[in-house]
Amino acid sequence: MHEFRYISNACRIMKTNMKFLKQKANQFYEELRVFLDMPVQCMNDIAKVFEIRCKPENIKNLSEAFKTQMMFHYVHEILYPTSNSALINVLIGDLPGFCRDLRFLLEALAKSYLTDIKHGKKHIREKMQLLNKEKKEHEWIKELDQEIGEKRAMRLWGKLSEDIHFNKYVKRIEKSIDVLGIPPSWALLIPCEFWEGDVDEILSDVWSYHGYLCEFIEILNLIWKKYLNILKNVF
């Protein structure tokens, strides 16, 4: 019975928080909708490259590509489930958890994309083995920025890393107590309902939670366009 009450309460809070975001932080809510739709859009883009709708027989070529393309697996096995995880973390009020999801998505994007452009049509298992022998996370992110042409990924990764670090976690709590007299909602109980003081944290500036999400979406779009162009030439 205790488990049922917990799940029932979590569902109620998620509905309440969704309504709150629509009313008080609609920009963030709309970006979340875009974010959640991205894996589906990416799979549609892949289907267009292989002309699946025009030539159903090309499904065999697509199946072969799944054996070699890390980015396919990124979309299907990382972006899709983790975007859902990020949404759930937002709706239960766990904003630090949302940041952890975004950082993981960014690191995985760098590794998947760069492994594909470096190692071409090597089998996916071989590529995964190569990943284990490669460089550290921040080095992958720096290299991804070389593909973007500016230090966008490194800035975002640094901000997300700082945000989920214990020291920043504590600083956010201290700031909330100094300004509002109480800790932020996510530091008191998870799941928790958003309240008015959370709007500033969500929307306040370029590096707010809304800003993190917008920047990740833009980076993913930039890299995805580059990847599609490469994919068209390879297959």
Image: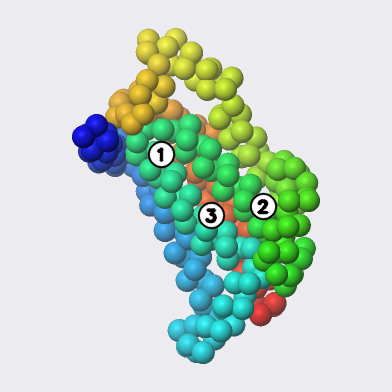
Residue in the image at 52% along x and 58% along y: 77
For the residue pair 62 and 16, the one nearer the viewer reads as 62
Residue 9 appearing in the image: no
**Tags 3 and 2 in contact by the CB under 8 Å rule?**
no
**Marks 3 and 2: which is nearer the front?**
3
N-terminal-most mark, 1 or 2? 1
Residue in the image at 70% along x and 43% along y: 137
Q: Which residue is mark 2?
A: 110
Q: Which mark is residue 78?
A: 3
When the figure is inspected, residue 140 is found, relative to residue 173, above or below; the finding is below
| Residue type pointed to by label 3 | Ile
Cα distance in 3D space between marks 3 and 2: 12 Å
Q: Position of residue 29 (x, y in %)?
A: 36, 44
Q: Is residue 191 left or right of residue 113?
A: left
Q: Is residue 18 left or right of residue 30?
A: left
To which quarter of the image does residue 63 belong? bottom right
N-terminal-most mark, 3 or 1? 3
Q: Secondary structure at mark 1?
A: helix
| Residue type pointed to by label 2 | Ala
The crowd level at tag 2 (other Cα within 10 Å; few <14, some 14-19, many 20+) is many
Q: Which residue is mark 1?
A: 89
**Tags 3 and 1 in contact by the CB under 8 Å rule?**
no
N-terminal-most mark, 3 or 2? 3
Residue in the image at 62% along x and 53% along y: 109
Q: Which mark is residue 108?
A: none
Residue in the image at 39% along x and 26% along y: 186
